[in-house]
């Protein structure tokens, strides 16, 4: 007559062992994927940081009028060549700025000018 | 459960936990660095845009004590009432601690246009002005070089 083991002495069933093993394996795989993703992230950042000190050339407008009206200077990663502006139109005009109005919404800049022929 | 089973389970759990913690630390640092770099990029852009604006109408750039001094075209200076007859009162830039100060010499009004700067180096060679600006340090830092050729 065989003795039935008490509940405290009973081992794990195959099903419990398999579930525990499955959960543990999934956890390890998840952590390994995180380690791998982190390595990729760090490599990407290393690549991103390489040579990350750009040089820009500030090139003011070669057109006098545009410069006087404070047109934004161009930012160029390469050295700008000589300007192509050939001077004021012929016949020339005297341009007097009478007033400027700047508005934020919508962003507009209105300039009232007076043109006088030379 | 026997003692040996318990020890094996604890060891395995500890290994998993250690791996997880090992990943978490560098990832958090990387995220913080990314945040700092984004901040640095924003401040660099602000500094560059202010210089770009003032140099767009610039006529002469020189050092005036600790200031990068920008004199503008007469027509531009007149718009701001800063034309003093034969010269522009001008705009000055200098590094004050970690702030880039822009001073309008017309009324000596100064305000910080960018913060967190670690370098604002100006080199003037003839008509060429080279400005090196850096924000942040190390992995989280960014830098840019601006060249203005009159």
Image: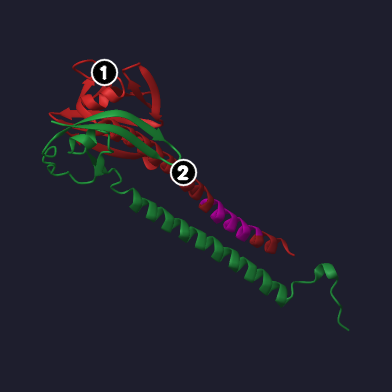
Chain colours: A green, B red
Q: Is residue B26 above or below residue A57?
A: below
Q: Is residue A73 above or below residue A16?
A: above
The answer, for residue B60, to whether it is visible in the render is yes
Where is mark 1, residue-wise?
B89
The answer, for residue B137, to whether it is visible in the render is no
| B15 is within the stretch colored magenta | yes
Q: Is residue A38 above or below residue B140?
A: below
Where disc 1 sits, the SS reads loop
Q: Is residue A101 left or right of residue A86?
A: right
Where disc 2 sits, the SS reads helix
The image shows residue B31 at horizontal and vertical percentages of: 48, 47
Outermost residue, bottom side: A1
Q: Nearer the viewer, residue B45 or B1?
A: B45
Give the alpha-carbon distance from disc 1 to disc 2, as whole Å: 39 Å
**Which of pointers 1 and 2 lies earlier in the amino acid sequence?**
2
- Does the CB distance between marks 1 and 2 fall below 8 Å? no
Q: Could you say which quadrant of the image residue A73 lies in?
A: top left
Q: Residues within 10 Å of mark 1 (few under 14, many from 20)?
A: many
Where is mark 2, residue-wise?
B35
Q: Nearer the viewer, residue B117 or A27?
A: B117
Q: Could you say which quadrant of the image residue B147 lies in?
A: top left
Q: Which residues are magenta?
A: B10-22
Q: Residue at 38% x, 20% y: name it.
A: B110
Q: Could you say which quadrant of the image residue B148 lies in?
A: top left
Q: Residue at 32% x, 39% y: name it.
A: B143
The image shows residue B125 at horizontal and vertical percentages of: 14, 29
| A13 is within the stretch colored magenta | no
């Amino acid at each position: 007559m065989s003795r039935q083991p008490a509940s405290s002495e009973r081992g794990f069933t195959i099903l419990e062992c398999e579930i525990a093993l499955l959960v543990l394996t999934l956890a390890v795989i998840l952590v390994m994927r995180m380690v791998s993703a982190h390595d990729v992230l760090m490599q990407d950042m290393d690549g991103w940081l390489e040579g990350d000190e750009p040089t820009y050339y500030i090139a003011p407008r070669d057109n006098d009028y545009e410069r006087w009206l404070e047109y934004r200077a161009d930012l160029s990663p390469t050295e700008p060549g000589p300007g192509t502006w050939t001077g004021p139109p012929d016949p020339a005009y005297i341009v007097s700025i009478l007033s400027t109005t700047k508005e934020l919404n919508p962003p507009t800049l209105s300039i009232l000018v007076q043109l006088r022929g030379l | 459960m026997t003692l040996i089973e318990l020890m094996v389970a604890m060891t395995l759990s500890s290994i998993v936990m250690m791996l997880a913690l090992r990943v978490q630390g560098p990832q958090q640092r990387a995220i913080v660095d990314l945040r700092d770099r984004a901040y640095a990029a924003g401040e660099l852009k602000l500094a560059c845009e202010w210089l770009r604006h003032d140099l767009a109408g610039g006529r002469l750039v020189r050092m005036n004590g600790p200031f990068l001094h920008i004199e503008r075209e007469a027509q531009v200076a007149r718009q701001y009432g800063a034309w003093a007859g034969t010269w522009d009162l001008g705009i000055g830039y200098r590094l004050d601690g970690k702030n880039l100060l822009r001073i309008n010499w017309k009324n000596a009004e100064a305000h910080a246009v960018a913060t967190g700067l670690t370098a604002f180096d100006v080199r003037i060679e003839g008509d060429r002005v080279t400005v090196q600006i850096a924000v942040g340090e190390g992995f989280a830092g960014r830098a840019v070089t601006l060249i203005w050729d009159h």
